[in-house]
Amino acid sequence: MKQILNILLPLILVSCTNIEATQTPIVITTKVIPTSTVLPPTPFPSITPTPEPSCDPVSEEFCITEGHFIFQRPIHQPGNDLVDPTYRYGSTAEGTREPHHGVEFPNQSGTPVHAAAEGTVIFAGPDQEAIYAPWPNFYGNLVVIEHADKLFTLYAHLSKINVKPGQQVAAGDTIGEVGRTGAAIGSHLHFEVRRGNAQDYFATQNPELWLIPPKKVNGERFGTLMISVVDQDHNLIKSAEFTLRSLLTQAKEKVKSYYGSTYSADMLNGDENAVLGELPAGQYRIAIERNGKVYERLLEVESGKLTQVVFVVR
């Protein structure tokens, strides 16, 4: 693979204009990235992976890590267990909607919804008071589960709730059914991950950094890409566009293209400002545009793993 990348990189750079090279040749290494009814905290075994020897994505072209994929998908097949790519975490649907604090799983009403991990239900019912959002009846019928390490998962817009506050659930237990209650547009599950304070609307994490990548579909296996675009002081920036395109390794393959932008400004509360989950494993070229300049990189996505890439831009 290293030979392929070393051949492709000069060809790509020659064909592009106004491109600023920011890194040294590609090196693949490994790193682990580090209510109406409120109950006392429940002790659980830690579900955060133990750190391993690290690779610095600032000094390397990219790093491939185990990530922290600890949550099962809340929708099981044959239901749609893939995230809606048109309204990802931190996006605004091209400025037409509120910055998204979670992800959506479009499904028919009545599709079973499952607990992403073991935990204790701390809320189950209609959000008639503005507890988990700044507005009442925003999430409609809502279930909130507390997990280990002060992690919480939220399941919103349900048509039916099958659990009660205080109930212990195991990963995969059915907790409700998909619906369109609250501020839902169409039938879907709205799924969030919060850390530290379940009632803090801005304590969200990008769920695609926590959800186990889906099983292979049509022969493809999937990984997740975490993108950090920072200034020279290593502060996350806003308003950067990116393009990701797959590199062809066989004549029968087709180029896969993905387009996006960094999170809305009020969502920069993690180590990244963009994530693309459910990416087919393979080699890609990513280009970031910022202030009229294009920063370009080659990277690889592995099945079930997290790829980190950091761009330092002016």
Image: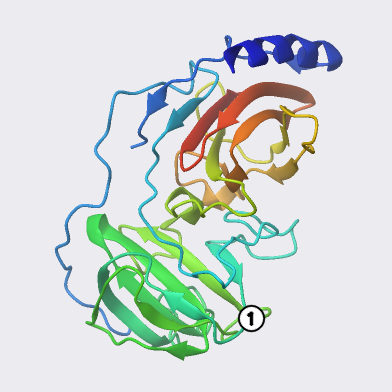
Which residue position holds label 1? 187
Q: Where's the C terminus, which quadrant? A: top right
Q: Quadrant of residue 296?
A: top right
Left or right? Give the position of 199 relative to 82: left
Q: Is residue 195 above or below residue 16?
A: below
Q: Nearer the viewer, residue 112 or 314?
A: 112
Location of residue 168 in the rendering, given as x and y in whole percent from the top left corner: 22, 77
- 131, above or below 4, in the image: below
**Residue 42 placement, left or right of 95:** left
Point out residue 63 in the picture as x, y percentages from the top left corner.
47, 26
Which quarter of the figure is the N terminus placed in?
top right
Q: Please tell me which residue lies in front, 89 or 118.
A: 118
| Location of residue 4 (image quadrant) | top right
Q: Is residue 178 at least partly visible in the picture?
A: yes
Identified at 56% across, 72% down, the residue is 78
Number of labels in the image equals 1
> For residue 274, which quarter of the picture?
top right
Badge 1 marks a residue whose secondary structure is loop
Nearest the eye: 268 or 161: 161
24 w.r.t. 49: above or below: above
In the displayed orientation, state which residue is furthest to the left. Answer: 43
Residue 313 in view here: no
Q: Residue at x 25, y 69 (%)?
A: 119
Q: Please state the horizontal and vertical placement of residue 251, each as a whole percent of the image.
A: 80, 30
Q: Residues within 10 Å of mark 1 (few under 14, many from 20)?
A: many
Colour scheme shown: rainbow
Q: Amino acid at mark 1?
A: Ser
Q: Residue at x 50, y 23 (%)?
A: 233
Q: Is 199 displayed left or right of 158 in the figure?
A: left
Where residue 281 sits in the image (x, y, percent)?
58, 38
